[in-house]
Image (tube, rainbow, N blue to C red):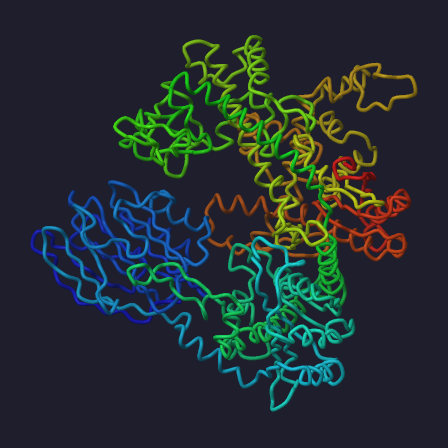
Amino acid sequence: MGFTSTTTQISPFGPICPSYFKLSRSCPCFASREGSSRPFSVALHRFWGKIPLRVIYDMQKKDEKRMVVSRNYNVPSGLEFATIQRDGRALWKQESIELFKQKCEYDDSTFSFKYGKMDINAIRTQDKPKSEKQLISRHVGLPVDSKRPNGLSSNDILKEGAWNNGSIMRRTENEKHFQSSELGHKGTVSTVQVQTNGRPHKPDIRERLTSIYESVLVVDNVAMAKEVVSKLTNQYRHLIHACDTEVAKINVKEETPIDHGEITCFSIYSGPEADFGSGKSCIWVDVLDGGGGDLLNEFALFFEDPDIKKVWHNYSFDNHVIENYGISVSGFHADTMHLARLWDSSRRLNGGYSLEALTGDQKVMCGAGSCYKELIGKVSMKTIFGKKKVKKDGSEGKITTIAPVEELQREEREPWICYSALDAVSTLQLYKSLESQLSKMPWNLDGKRVSQKSMFDFYQEYWQPFGEILVRMETEGMLVDRAYLAEVEKVAKAEQEVAANRFRNWACKYCPDAKYMNVGSDTQLRQLLFGGVHNSKDPLITLPEVKTIKIPNVDKVIEEGKKTPTKYRNIKLSSIGVDLPVETYTATGWPSVSGDALKTLARKISSEYGVNDAAGSRLDDTVLDNSETMTDEDSESKESSIVENEDESDYVPGLRRFQTPEEGIEACHAIASLCEMCSIDSLISNFILPLQSNNISGQSGRVHCSLNINTETGRLSARRPNLQNQPALEKDRYKIRQAFIAAPGNSLIVADYGQLELRILAHLADCKSMLDAFKAGGDFHSRTAMNMYPHIREAVEKKRVLLEWYPQPGEDKPPVPLLKDAFASERRKAKMLNFSIAYGKTPVGLSRDWKVSVAEAKETVNLWYKERKEVLKWQQARKKEAREDGRVHTLLGRARTFPLLTNASSSLRGHVERAAINTPVQGSAADVAMCAMLEISKNTCLKELGWRLLLQVHDEVILEGPTESAEVAKAIVVECMSKPFGGKNFLKVDLAVDSKCAQNWYSAK
């Protein structure tokens, strides 16, 4: 959306600075350069259908730079572009902007600055995705997260008297006039007016919203409820009904809706054909105050009828809150969120799937029966009811607050009724539009057109029942042993403190005050390890050698000149004085102290300390019992024994910059301890503590996560908590999975596909070598290594090594070494290649992983492709499909679109091409897992035995049921998973399934 009108009056800044302010409708690349060799440009532009206003201050010499910014952000036609030109005097060290508030609502501000430069990047955005900020900053030459200069306000950017040697810009009373004065020069830019034809102002939105009030029937008594339910279940039962609830007393970001929240009202829209009296087609039911429960129960007949079709937006949430009242919801027909994801999987990072975003997008709603301009569309609660928080001085603040739902329903009754009723109306309109558009999309199954079938048929056959399965799985939840987690928490925190103290003790040898430092602070770690280092982006800026840090005075130290302990005290943190190597930098140009950067410094020791994975692992190969905790003395003894026997040649060369090899090795151990501490912290914060929270569990103590189809490949994701992101089994140092248990008398079945994605790749590419290897069975990665390396093949053929070995009674070791042991390095590369190539990884990426040259990595990749030419051909075909069609497809025909491919940069194009290779593989694996779950859920024998699906984690499913039938049920589950397509397997390769029964998740792995 462009800017509709702009007016200005120009006056010179003065004879010393003969510059002027000019507004132009031209593209920024055509900005005038008259009278100046260094133009200073301001670009204002909006996205279609979005609120964000981008303001980019760019001090660049070349117009091409501004072209790049505009092209990447797809500036729409009608852009009003402003250009400020100055003479480039040294006086202009800093500039300030005031981004005046338009009548539209803007949710947040992020400002990035570069000290000592003229570049300022101000972004005003609603959702502020990080990638967008990075793109802008990269072209403007700014760090994303730079701090604001002192005195700078995020809201008004600069208030009077704030900056020296710069300029002051401030709003006048009408907020449409800017006054600017440069210190030492007189002059003004009298008027700048900018208007947009975007979202209506709040009063206009309210007026449009309340216009539907006359079409809404308010149901607030039992008699009226009975009459409405009678029409819904008889006269209008053939219609499709959109339903929505409003819920109070719940934090939707942190709490599960199961056994949480209270419904205040709900709405049902059955389309314009329905008339519930006086032409009212939408009903709104008030269940907030006394008698609300009785009203809700009157609608049980409607909600529980399986033959009455109901559509929802985010069905799982509404289902759970209704079922909290003892009503079993049935008749699920569609979830418009899932329909939208099936129609366009790329919106997750490009618009989103909220009801507001979807109904506000003309492209999404063009399939609706009504003209798009006549549709009101969902409006956010914040837009309608949000109010700016008032500061202590009485002025309006930045923070927007919303009153509790129950308060809005009582005090803003008419707009609230319209707001909540509009949810149901918008949902049905969205459903009709998406049904129409999906019905026009052909359905291709395994690359072949399904006769007379569309992607809406696909939804009805697969995703609709799958959506219902996910809701049932959320309802079931998983039982968690909180007592076990409480004990694990004690052990973890104790070991975390040991690791932190181990690092502090080492650091104190170089900086005495390091024993008081916060080892979790990036700023303090960077000061300790890299003090004195120059900024990589601006060599004139340097980290100080010594820095004063304010810390909480927990030890009640009385500082010199004080009579009593103060709340905070100062420590002096100095650099260790060693020129440590820096491989990665932050966006602002400072040495990175992230987990990966620290692991690189620790190199070999990080592996021995088990911190090569974000989830962490034990210091040794065994997991301590709950009663055991490693003490500082144990740690020091273990560390000293390691240091004594350590070979300095195993360490990164940069750490030899210490005075002695022993000091370098000791530093490695200290940094590895720091990595270990971070790994433990990750386990505590992501798993151990959240799993004990009441927010994610119901009254039964079972944990209920939210399962969603919101990845671009179609894989499931989980949140609140994220059970999809469990630590790798070998890295599960505290056995987190052991906390997930079966109820008394029950067992868990854990069934997992073996190498599913590689099997999918073999099928899709029709690769003979891979198909033969899977048919032969055994160790697939060893066979890959044998086919890649002639010397390994020779060793196998001459029986100097074995591909695999199956021990017979009385045999405890193979007659000759196994290939995986004798050629471990080659097999490791083969295994990495098997998975990396399936994900579209290039030799450049592999060279980083292996720490080798690109040429060497490419040579290894060529060895892999030598026996798998079909895979290379298939990958090239997918890249071409993505370039030409803008999409690729999974096994069952789901499409992933690539809207950013047009005019994409080389790096973005590379990302898209990798995604084009990965999506058919990973997405098809998700298809297979989904079909397996459908087979399991409709298996009558499993139902009769009492077995229920609990969770799916990538290629793994978990069920719970009676222990006495566990083995029978396990065999059925394996059969369903190995033949997931209606009891058949049409793939060219068998689907291997590993399964096990146990009392907890860990033991069943």
**Of 874 and 175, the residue lying toward us:** 175
Tell me the quarter of the picture where residue 187 sits. bottom left
Residue 979 percent across, percent down from the top left: 84, 49
Tell me the quarter of the picture where residue 198 sits. bottom left
Image quadrant holding the N terminus, namely bottom left
Q: Is residue 749 above or below residue 708?
A: above
Q: What residue is at 60 percent from the left and 54 percent from the top? A: 255
Image quadrant holding the C terminus, namely top right
Q: In the shown orientation, is residue 643 left or right of residue 932?
A: left
**How many numbered markers are drawn?**
0
Q: What residue is at 51 percent from the left and 32 percent from the top? A: 595
Q: Looking at this view, name the residue that lies furthest to the front.
A: 563
Residue 251 percent across, percent down from the top left: 56, 57
Q: In the shown orientation, is residue 704 left or right of residue 563?
A: right
**Of 144 and 321, the residue lying toward us:** 321
Q: What residue is at 78 percent from the left and 16 percent from the top? A: 817
Residue 699 percent across, percent down from the top left: 70, 54
